[in-house]
Image: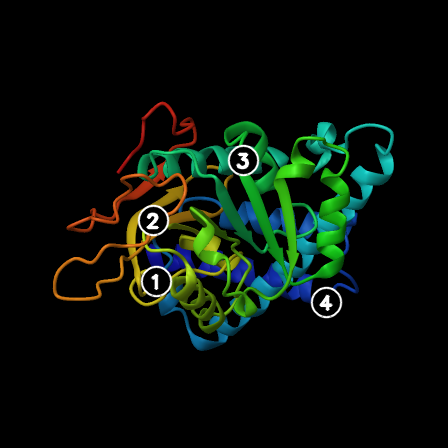
Amino acid sequence: MVCQEQEALVNKVLDLYHKISTLDTLKPSKAVDTLFTQLVHTCIPHTPFIDITKLPTTIQEARSNLIRLCGEAESLLETHYSTLLVSSFSNENPLGHLHVFPYYSNYLKLSRLEFNILSQHFQAVPTKIAFVGSGPLPLTSIVLATNHFSNTTFHNYDIDALANSMAKALVSSDLDLSKRMVFHTTNILDVSHGLDEFNVVFLAALVGMENEEKKKVIDHLGKYMAPGALLMVRSAHGARAFLYPVVDLSSDLEGFEVLSVFHPSDEVINSVVIARKCPIIATASLSTEQGFDGVGSMAMHNKRSEEIQSVFISNNNHYNNGNVIE
């Protein structure tokens, strides 16, 4: 029965992949929206019978290609709506109309989830947060800065100059956010100076689409982040791994202590991994680690790892009520 379910799901995903791959363009349109909506609805249901790592090589290759197509479509969708917001609401604050973006409610839920997860492991309010892979519509940074961290500065890193230009234009009319949102156009692998200043670093799901690429980015962050700083990584679980890359906890997070892993079961697609940069031990005895703003007694003197938690968030749970299923 399990094999039949897996075969049916994989065949449906492959059918949609072939249809998407034959499209002339992935820019927002009725045909594009319909196919990707069908794909998301196929992959969202809880599918414990799917183990992506055990699928045949041909399907693995198709999955890698599909993730790249999803990434391209997502970028084009964000570009479209970032442009629309700035051009349509030029005489007022475009940020007051973010609800026109079709997945805005998902970002609200994901940001709330990440805020609650972060609050469990970081007692102070972060003074500086970095988001790697922010794109032309940096919704996570905007929502966190507006709803959860009203005094925190957000540094957004993206390799695309046009994406950063659009994002900057989007927040420019907001007097508060325009001062607290900083945009850096660069490959994060070229950044070393300053990464140790951030209390928290977010890594977007589509930064590093292949396993090797993702690990290379995480290794780089691990090299230059401050000991004790937190890394929030977005991953995927079950059939949702056909949409986004999966972070391998056993090999991709060397130099980090994995604190928790959360797998939502509602329309929020991404899993969330939170990990702490391991302290640097200079000698046999515990050295004095580097401190940074807002951390205080944050567990740089941690003597043992916390148990990794895998949690499924129920459809009716907003996480802040504590009703979680382990």
Calculate the distance from the C-alpha at mark 3 to the C-alpha at mark 4: 37 Å
Which of the two labelled residues, at mark 1 and mark 2, occupies the earlier sequence position? 1
The residue beneath circle 1 is 253
Left or right of 280? Residue 141 is right
Instruction: Point out the frontmost of discs 1 and 4.
Output: 1
Q: In front: mark 2 or mark 4? A: 2
Res 144 label: 3
Q: Residue at x 29, y 42 (%)?
A: 298
Foreground residue among 146 and 10? 146
Q: Nearer the viewer, residue 60 or 125?
A: 125
Work out how far the residue at label 2 is from the one at label 4, CA to CA, in angstroms.
Answer: 52 Å
Q: Earlier in the sequence, mark 3 or mark 2?
A: 3
The kind of secondary structure element at disc 4 is loop
Q: Which residue is mark 2?
A: 291
Calculate the distance from the C-alpha at mark 3 to the C-alpha at mark 2. Answer: 24 Å
Amino acid type of the residue tagged 1 in the rendering:
Leu
> Which numbered marker is on residue 22?
4
* Up-down relation of residue 175 to residue 76 (above or below): above
* Left or right for 127, reference 295: right
Q: Quick check: can you spot residue 144?
A: yes
The answer to whether residue 272 is left or right of residue 15 is left
Residue 184: x and y, percent? Answer: 64, 56
Q: Circle 3: is it few (<14), some (14-19), or many (20+) Cα within 10 Å?
A: some
Image height check: is 87 above or below 205?
Answer: above
Secondary structure under the numbered disc 1 in the rendered image: loop
